[in-house]
Amino acid sequence: MPEMLEAKFGSLRFQGLARVCERLSLATANHVIATNDSYRDLAVRRGGKDPRKVTVVRYGATRSGSSIRPLCGTERSVTGG
């Protein structure tokens, strides 16, 4: 996302190139994994992705620390070990 480059480097120098790369990446992706709802919304709104093809996967341990589960989409879980 171009906003991340601006926040990290404080420059809009490559924002146009970053937007083109973002657009191409989203257009060619079969499925998008986002780290939070804000990036999910950007993929849907700016990238034109079907909301069913964008999954939010939050990073961090659960209280039990035993499994990681996606918030939406599939019922599968990944067991930590």
Image: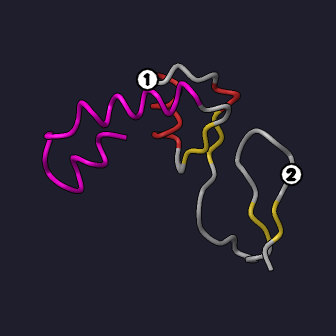
Assess whether residue 3 is covered by the magenta stretch: yes
Q: Secondary structure at mark 1?
A: loop
Does residue 81 sit above or below 44 in this rendering?
below
**Residue 79 lies in quadrant:** bottom right
Q: For mark 1, what is the residue?
A: 46
Looking at the rendered structure, the kind of residue marked 1 is Arg
Residue located at (63% from left, 35% from top): 54
For the residue pair 67 and 13, the one nearer the viewer reads as 13
Q: Is residue 49 left or right of residue 19?
A: right
What's the magenta region? 1-28
Badge 2 or badge 1: first in the primary sequence: 1
**Residue 28 lies in quadrant:** top right
Snapshot colouring: secondary structure
**Residue 38 location, x and y as percent?**
46, 39
Q: Magenta region's main secondary structure?
A: helix
For the residue pair 70 and 18, the one nearer the viewer reads as 18
**Residue 5 location, x and y as percent?**
27, 48
Q: For mark 2, what is the residue?
A: 76
